[in-house]
Image (cartoon, helix red, strand yellow):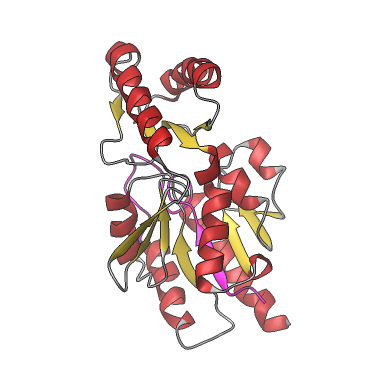
Amino acid sequence: MIKLFITDLDGCIAHPFLSPDWEALSRIKSLNIKSKNDEQIPALTICSGRPFPYVEAVGQWLDVDHPMLFESGGGMYDIQTNEITWNPHFGDEAKKAVSEIKEWLEKTLIKNYKGTYPEFAKYTDAGLVNPDSSKIALMHEEVLNHVNGNYPMFEVHATDVSVNIILKKANKGEGIRFLSKKLKIDLEEVAYIGDSSGDIPGLQIVGRSFAPSNAKHFVKETVDTVTQTPATEGVLEAYELLIQQNQEQ
């Protein structure tokens, strides 16, 4: 029985820089509301590399009442108590490193790639965004070389529109472990859907793993199920499949 369904945001709940699929989102929200009174419908929550404000806003759209993970696994927000819990591995050394990485991004990358901006609200990691995937690919290589050579406690992930530098002990796998312990739910009772490299640590540890049809090929090779539909519709498809499977048990 899957009790908790976790979704990524960019590439799953919505395509970055495009208007959301409000019809599919409304159906996802409706299922989540029904989960409060039907144990065969998993509760919905979020695990995203995005900063807190965006994750909180989307959580409100979907009527999420379980804790949500932001900055991959750097922070957890409990919407019921309005409390944030920071990853315990984010200590002074990591704070100093994040500050240095952000300064390096500003001085050497962001000013050289037009249309790039830093993810301003991030606290436990550093990130940059550009809607041009070709620029992201170039910046990803530069960031990999710099971080791997200077900050071994961090790992680098990229989506089509972003590059994220994340503390290894605060990635999505660690975040989902942290969340499952808080909720006293076994990882085998958790499902997760993700589309990019940063999602793999989470996809590898849950009971059921999904990727939408728009996911990176190496993510599709990692999961139990690839949905027939992309992004928002893919999340809805996975959610309905989980419900069906729960009902059949």
Q: List x then y, in percent, for residue 80.
A: 32, 74
- How many circles with numbers are drawn on the protein? 0
Which of the two residues, 4 or 177, is positioned nearer the viewer here? 177
Q: Over which residues does the magenta segment extend?
A: 1-22
The residue at 67%/55% (across/down) is: 205
Q: Is residue 5 visible?
A: no
Q: In the rendered view of the protein, which quadrant contains the N terminus?
A: bottom right
Residue 90 point in image, percent of width and height: 43, 43
Place residue 78 in its image quadrant.
Answer: bottom left
* Residue 58 can be seen, yes or no: yes
Q: Is residue 98 above or below residue 77?
A: above
Residue 119 image-quadrant placement:
top left
Instruction: Kindly identify the residue that appears in the image at 45 percent across and 51 percent down.
Output: 88
**Residue plotted at (53% across, 15% down):** 145
The verdict on residue 5 being magenta is yes
Can you tell which quarter of the image residue 139 is in?
top left
Residue 156 in the image: state x and y as whole percent: 52, 30
